Image: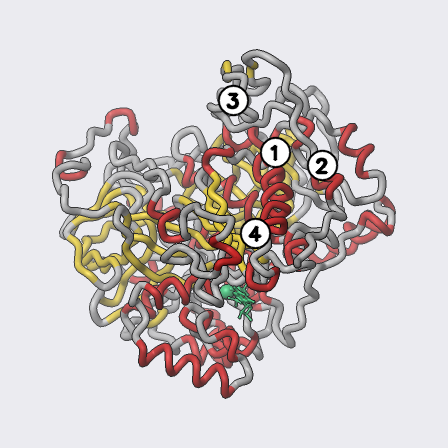
Amino acid sequence: MFVPKTDNQSDLEEPCRNPGPWQCTICTHQNETSYISCELCGVLRNLSLYFNNAVGTEGGAKRRNKHSGVSVLARSLFSPPSPKSKAVVFSDGFQGNTNTTGYMQASLDALHETYMTHKQRRVNIVPFKFDTPSPDDMVSAGLKSFKHVRKEAPSIDSVDIAGKKVMDDHDLVTQDAHTDPSSSAKLDELGGNGSSVDVHIQNKTPVLDDELQHLSLEGKPKNIKAKIKKPVSVSQYKAEPWMLQGEDQKMPRQLNLAIVGHVDSGKSTLCGRLLHALGRISKKQMHKNEKEAKEKGKGSFAYAWAMDESAEERARGVTMTVGVAYFDTENYQVVLLDSPGHKDFVPNMISGATQSDAAVLVVDASVGSFESGMGVNGIGQTKEHAQLIRSFGVENLIVAVNKMDSVEYSKERFSFVKSQLGMYLRSCGYKESAISWVPLSAMNNENLVTVASDTRLSSWYDGNCLLKAIDSLAPPRRDVSKPLRLPICDVVSSHMLGQVAVCGKVATGAIRSDSKVLVMPSGELATVRIIERDSSRLNLARAGDNIAIGLQGIDPIHVTSGGVLCHPDYPVSVASSLELKILVLDITVPILVGLQFELHIHHAKVSASLVKILSLLDQKTGKASAKKPRMLTARQAAIIEVKLEREVCVEEFSALKALGRAFLRSQGITVAVGVVTRVPEQVQV
Ligand code: GTP
Ligand code: MG
């Protein structure tokens, strides 16, 4: 009989339950007595539960008391932003474009040594054992973050920014091993997240490299802006009848489902198993995968190989880029976004998960593995992914408690996982009613598409199988009433779609064939030639649809991942400085003014610097305090000004959430999450 481990039992604390209805301290909404978190903004009734993960470090209990009022996560990210504040003024001495990363690293390390006790330092859970290069470098240098176009239409290849065809992924992978990590910085200048730029070309063709640098969007902002029509106020926008839902009743509802979770929790295996059970993988293909995986001594990864297609991913047994696949349920056309779990690939995970409507958080029930994901010895990606996904606006979550076979389908272990993780999820702002818990074994195909057949599970579990849980997810909200915004995830070239094709999810509005779109930030107009989803042609796509679009009448150099397709009369804002409201995560090194970091906004990734900390937000009230600190430490919330190395397409969070969420990453970890509260630089004409 399996005996669950209870060494973390002390983490389990029930929220305080004062009798009677209660008012949310954040949004002042009156909630019913039975609710443990605010119905409106998701903030927990008992604020002390935020960041309860501090327990376990030295003096953890004390720290929890000290920060008992920390409630800024939800306030910072999920409540409406405060009214516009004062204008942003950058300090004179700021050298925004100077790359001082090396210097910052040194000084931060010194600070780290000075301020942190040995026990407070993070211990990486799974030391990264890959030979070369650093995955973050590859992410920066343009490994494709999405593979779905190649999966669905093999004729499509990635193109570089100048529209030249580049090699397929297998070549790319081989070359990655010899990539000079320094190339990432250069490529970052090219626009977007650089995800369609080939590192091989970077290394081997310095001339082209120069050309590419020359093509940097930064080099020609004046021309760009001159081409953009004077923006019309969005308030004047009126959606045309064809854009609105209802006209095309036959169109099924699309659900973008991110599969997230700690490394090796079984995400890809689960996706592969699901697809296989639903007949989306042919017997022949499965047989081939099984045979090849066995030959390479990776027999247990045969199902994961359905998602992990590149030679490198297969050799390492680790997902590196987001895999995309499709299947249908009764209610939804599901777009599966299989994210990498390893901490070094969080940027890729962000790129995929930013499109999700709902998520499946896969946790490994095995003894020790679940604890690793929860970060007993460091930052576990179970927690990091759960928090990131919530800050992307995902409200509905399925927790797939996987590898139940390894704990003999123990009910006690399942309950233990549920209570431990449930507590944390609520602290992230998930409502209890929006979380479904499904015990399963991806490997043994237990409880995936049909009810469990193993009596060790079916004897105590009679809830939904995974497929049913997915089908029962609440329909995502779609905003078709606003002007078109389609953040570009990838730029591709294909025989079917033409020389310039882009992939991404329509954030707002609608798009149809033969219509004109404004490609930002270049400000060039293009015509929509073809719209495709899962290799099927569509006449139109609306908010929420994940599609590939063939464009014509535009030079490929004007189309970059991280850019946005817009309604021609309503261009998205473009800015190179921003005001953000952030929540600092559990970092060990303080964030100082001048820090250089990577800023992720939808699919754009840009080097940025912290120019000013405008104010610290009071941990209890969420109001700005007069204090202007020189640095920020873990769990503080603040309003900051940042300067970006180049312009990005962005919206204030209050105007469009999908384009107003920001993630700050430094030294390979997410140091803060936040929202854009002000876009000081609007496009001027
Ligand atoms: P990353 O994408 O790299 O984060 O990993 P992942 O979460 O996709 O895990 P993956 O599917 O690659 O599986 C990792 C290992 O777990 C493989 O050896 C799988 O065979 C194994 N595994 C997956 N599901 C199960 C399961 O239900 N039971 C058992 N015992 N092993 C499983
Ligand atoms: Mg995987």
Mark 2 crowd level (few <14, some 14–19, many ≥20, 10 Å Cα): some
Label annotation for residue 82: 3
- Residue drawn 86% across and 51% down? 118
Note whether ligand 1 is within 8 Å of mark 2: no
CA gap between label 4 and label 2 equals: 19 Å
320 left or right of 586 in image: left
Q: Which of marks 4 and 2 is in front?
A: 2
Residue receiving disc 2: 632
Q: Which of marks 3 and 4 is in front?
A: 3
- Which corner quadrant of the image does residue 136 belong to? bottom right
Neighbour tally class for label 3: few under 14, some 14-19, many 20 plus, Cα within 10 Å: few
Please tell me in which quadrant of the rendered image residue 9 appears. top right
Kindly indicate whether the residue at mark 4 contacts the one at mark 3 (C-beta within 8 angstroms). Answer: no
Could you tell me residue 122's position as x and y percent? 76, 53
Name which residue type carries label 3.
Ser
Query: What residue sits right under mark 4 in the picture?
Result: 607
Residue labelled with disc 1:
640
Work out whether 637 lies above or below 295: above
Q: Quadrant of ligand 1?
A: bottom right
For the rendered model, the colour scheme is secondary structure
Cα–Cα span, label 3 and label 4 = 26 Å
- Mark 1 Cα-neighbour bin, 10 Å: few <14, some 14–19, many ≥20: many
